[in-house]
Amino acid sequence: MVTVEPHERFSGIYWITLEDGIRRLATISFAPGIKVYGEITVNIGDKEYRVWNPYRSKLAASILKEVSLMPIKPGSKVLYLGASTGTTVSHVSDIVGDQGIVYAVEFAPRVARELIEKVVKYRSNVIPIYQDATQPHNYSALLDEVDIIYCDIAQPQQAKPLADNADLYLADGGSIMLAIKAMSIDVTKEPSETYKKEMKILEQRGFNIIDAIHLEPYDKDHAMITARYSRKSS
């Protein structure tokens, strides 16, 4: 028997138990009938639930690793840096629902086209921005102040672009989630050393670190940093 229940801590997220008895994360689809990455879907009542794969989404992995702060909720306005083909973007779209919005920044042309074909065409709450996240002034005409910045970019600098975007677009007291890919920053250093360096940059730019968790076994040499932003102290 398939069962579903709300996540005990985070609004808009669910636990779904399939016939195999294993409990998995899920979200209610904003675009029923449309799969994004071959995910399992289950209809219960008048809702379609999309099983959320933590091996394909660092945000799902963070929730399973019991991150203490997951600020994305129904109605949130989210700036998503490094949208890629939209796997995690689609679940964020599910969570924020029709009262929220996701500004999805992606720079690689082929990837951006896939994002549009798989996600944007079916989800009115996702606004694509075809720009480089390290140049946030270039898209100042396309978005307003946001509640949350989610950053997942594979570049030698990851905290700095996030902080540059926060200075322009994040509300005072807003939250960030930064997925750090240690090997994209410096392959010669231990990942823990790289995480500390990126967190120090955030602290110097006005962020109060809430949590830092490693994402193994779902993602090797990755960590998720969560923090709150204080414009007054930046």
Image (cartoon, rainbow, N blue to C red):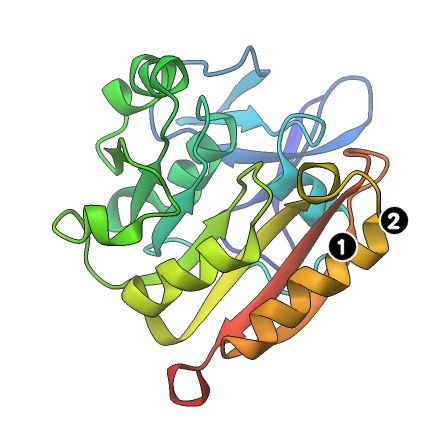
Reading the image, the residue beneath label 1 is 194
Mark 1 neighbour density, 10 Å: few (under 14) some (14–19) many (20 or more): many
Q: Are marks 1 and 2 in contact (CB under 8 Å)?
A: yes
Q: Quadrant location of residue 89?
A: top left
From this view, report whether residue 3 is shown above or below residue 95: above
Q: Which mark is drawn over residue 210?
A: none
Quadrant assignment for the C terminus: bottom left
Tell me what residue is drawn at x 54 percent, y 42 percent: 152
**Residue 25, x across and y down, in percent:** 65, 36
Q: Amino acid at mark 1?
A: Thr
> Quadrant of the image for the N terminus?
top right
Residue 175 on image: x %, y %? 48, 67
Q: Is residue 43 left or right of residue 213?
A: left
Q: From the top left corner, tell me how far across and down residue 211 is, in percent.
A: 70, 67
Relative height, residue 94 to residue 204 (above, below): above
Q: Give above or below for 169 relative to 161.
A: below
Camera-nearest residue between 71 and 141: 141
Q: Residue at x 21, y 47 (%)?
A: 138
Disc 2 crowd, CA 10 A, few/some/many (<14, 14-19, 20+): few
Residue denoted by label 2: 190
Residue located at (68% from left, 52% from top)? 224
Count of numbered labels shown in the rendering = 2
Give the residue at the far bottom of this rendering: 232
Outermost residue, left side? 141
